[in-house]
Amino acid sequence: MLLVFYVMLVITMAIEVLRREIFAFSSIWGEEIVRYSFIYLAWIGAAAAVKERAHIRIDVIMHYLGPRPKALLYIFGDLIMFGVAIIALYWSWETVHVSAKFGSVTDGLRISKVWFLMAVPVGFALMIVRLIQSLLHDFRSLRDGTPVFEGDKLFD
């Protein structure tokens, strides 16, 4: 899905730039497609980053810890993030519900905003799934005494 939204964003943006520069004409729908593709791209990408442990974090202390304390710290962080994701999922779903109740539509496409507001609850739901997977892996690593998955290092 990340690739689909990224390609849709790039192609639509390129077409809109060409239309604006060559034909001196642009459309509202093109801007909306780019905007909403970017929103979905960001939220699905956030869930993918949870899977890869790629979110920004300060991990200086992790270099000095053994496998067991490191696993406990990752579990603690994932549990905090899980709680925040549950709360955010609830409140983002409330926004979708209000939009559906009042029938709000986008300006250019005239499509229900529910489809685009759903990016946030979908993103948090995917994050919750990925956090559960991460917690299961971390508990298994803690039980077995093996090193936890720390994600790929940007700098070594």
Image (cartoon, grey):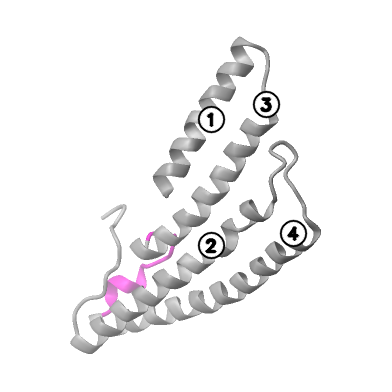
Q: Which mark is residue 27?
A: 3
Please provide the residue range marked out in magenta.
Answer: 54-66
Task: Please identify the quadrant where the C terminus is shown.
Answer: bottom left
* Residue at point 57%, 49% (across, down): 39
Q: Which mark is residue 122?
A: 2
From the top left corner, tell me how far across and down residue 41 is, in percent: 49, 48
Q: Amino acid at mark 3?
A: Ser
Mark 1 and mark 4 in contact? Answer it, CB < 8 Å.
no
Q: Check disc 1 and report the residue beneath it.
A: 12
Q: Amino acid at mark 1?
A: Thr
Mark 3 and mark 4 in contact? Answer it, CB < 8 Å.
no
* Element at label 3: loop
Query: Which residue is situated farthest in the bottom direction here?
Result: 143
How many neighbours does mark 4 have within 10 angstroms: few (below 14), some (14-19), or many (20 or more)?
some
* Element at label 2: helix
From the top left corner, tell me how far across and down residue 95 is, in percent: 71, 64
